[in-house]
Amino acid sequence: MCLAIPAKVISVDGTTARVTIEDVEYTASLLLLDDVKPGDFIMLHAGFAIEKVDPQEAAETLQLLLDMEKNLPN
């Protein structure tokens, strides 16, 4: 299964960005998107920013993923 996870952009340097997901930082390629700036929310898949999303959608999606994780069998 492939999954994209919402991330907040904290800095941009050319075609890469530093993003955060639940206080963990990652590097994301911006080659597939235009006009990404700090404060934006993106969907991160396999190291690539594939879509910009609004903050509410990002929060709702992340909460759904966290809720799913809580329900996984041990």
Image (cartoon, rainbow, N blue to C red):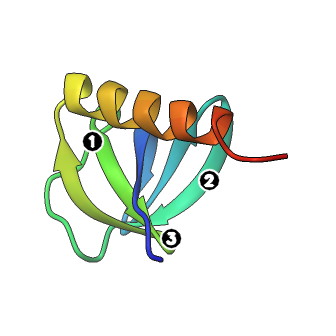
Q: Secondary structure at mark 3?
A: loop
Residue 60 shows in the view: yes
Whether the residues at callouts 3 and 2 have beta carbons within 8 Å, the answer is yes
Question: Would you name the residue on which mark 1 appears?
Answer: 37
Residue type at mark 3 is Gly
Q: Give the alpha-carbon distance from disc 3 to disc 1, as whole Å.
A: 17 Å
Q: CA distance from mark 1 to mark 2?
A: 15 Å
- Whichever of labels 1 and 2 marks the residue nearer the N terminus, that label is 2
Q: Which numbered disc, 3 or 1, marks the residue that appears first in the sequence?
A: 1
Residue 47 got which mark? 3
Callout 2 environment at 10 Å: few (<14), some (14 to 19), or many (20+)? some
Q: Residues within 10 Å of mark 1 (few under 14, many from 20)?
A: some
- The mark found on residue 14 in the picture is none
13 displayed left or right of 30: right
Secondary structure type for disc 2: strand
Q: What residue would you read off at disc 2?
A: 26
Name, please, the residue furthest toward the front: 73
Residue 16 in the image, given as x and y percentages of width and height: 44, 64
Q: Identify the element where label 1 is drawn.
A: loop
Closer to the chain start, of discs 3 and 2, is 2
Indicate the amino acid at tag 1: Lys
Residue 25 image position (x, y, % from top left):
65, 44
